[in-house]
Image (cartoon, rainbow, N blue to C red):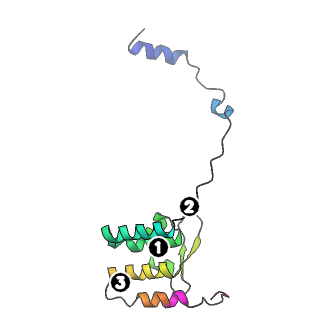
Amino acid sequence: MTGPESGRAFVRTMPCKVPSNPARLASQQKEPVGRLRFLSREEYDAVCADIREKFPEHLAEFIVSVNTGMRLSEEFSCTWSQLDFERRAIDLTNTKNGSSRTIHLNADALVAINSSIRARSPRTRSSPERAIKAATTPVRGSSHA
């Protein structure tokens, strides 16, 4: 039997309901833990040089990303209200797994954020000097210098 008739015959011979899911008989394999890798200083410098040459307007984004470990979606969905220069931190509320977390900013990330602010709005009061001062001033209540 060929054509439309063969399909109808197949449907008539199949049971209406499968009694159990045959996929449950297969054993589940654990997913390997994600690979953790950091750029070497040479790799970081090479990527920065490449971005500076080809896409200079995106250099600050790359520096913030590398220095904070933020996902792109977290970085690009940030609002200014989440950024706290006093604490040198970004408070993320909308993360991939749905929980909040705080990202601590080092001097490089602060300088990159400030350079991004200045590039977008030349009249802003923010400056890299302010970011460097914030990055080198101990956080209130912290024992770290």
What's the mark number on residue 106? none
Q: Compared to 133, does 23 lie above or below?
A: above
Q: Quadrant of the C terminus?
A: bottom right
Q: Say few, some or many: other residues with alpha carbon within 10 Å of mark 1 (under 14 / 14 to 19 / 20 or more).
A: many
Secondary structure under the numbered disc 3 in the rendered image: helix
* Magenta residues, start to end: 133-140
The alpha-carbon separation of the residues under discs 1 and 2 comes to: 17 Å
Q: Residue at x 42, y 87 (%)?
A: 128
Q: Residue 4: x, y in percent?
A: 39, 15
Verify CB contact (< 8 Å) between mark 1 and mark 2.
no
Name which residue type carries label 3: Arg
The alpha-carbon separation of the residues under discs 3 and 2 comes to: 32 Å
Name which residue type carries label 1: Val
Q: Compared to 9, does 95 lie above or below?
A: below
Q: Residue 107: x, y in percent?
A: 50, 82
Verify CB contact (< 8 Å) between mark 3 and mark 1.
no
Q: Compared to 108, does 45 lie above or below?
A: above
Q: Residue 44: x, y in percent?
A: 46, 69
Q: Residue 34: x, y in percent?
A: 59, 55
Q: Quadrant of the N terminus?
A: top left
| Residue pointed to by mark 3 | 118
- Which-is-in-front pick, marks 3 and 2? 2
Secondary structure under the numbered disc 1 in the rendered image: helix
What's the mark number on residue 37? 2
Q: Say few, some or many: other residues with alpha carbon within 10 Å of mark 2 (under 14 / 14 to 19 / 20 or more).
A: few
Relative to the observer, which residue lies in front, 131 or 16? 131
Q: Quadrant of residue 29?
A: top right
Chain-order first, disc 3 or disc 2: 2
| Residue pointed to by mark 1 | 64
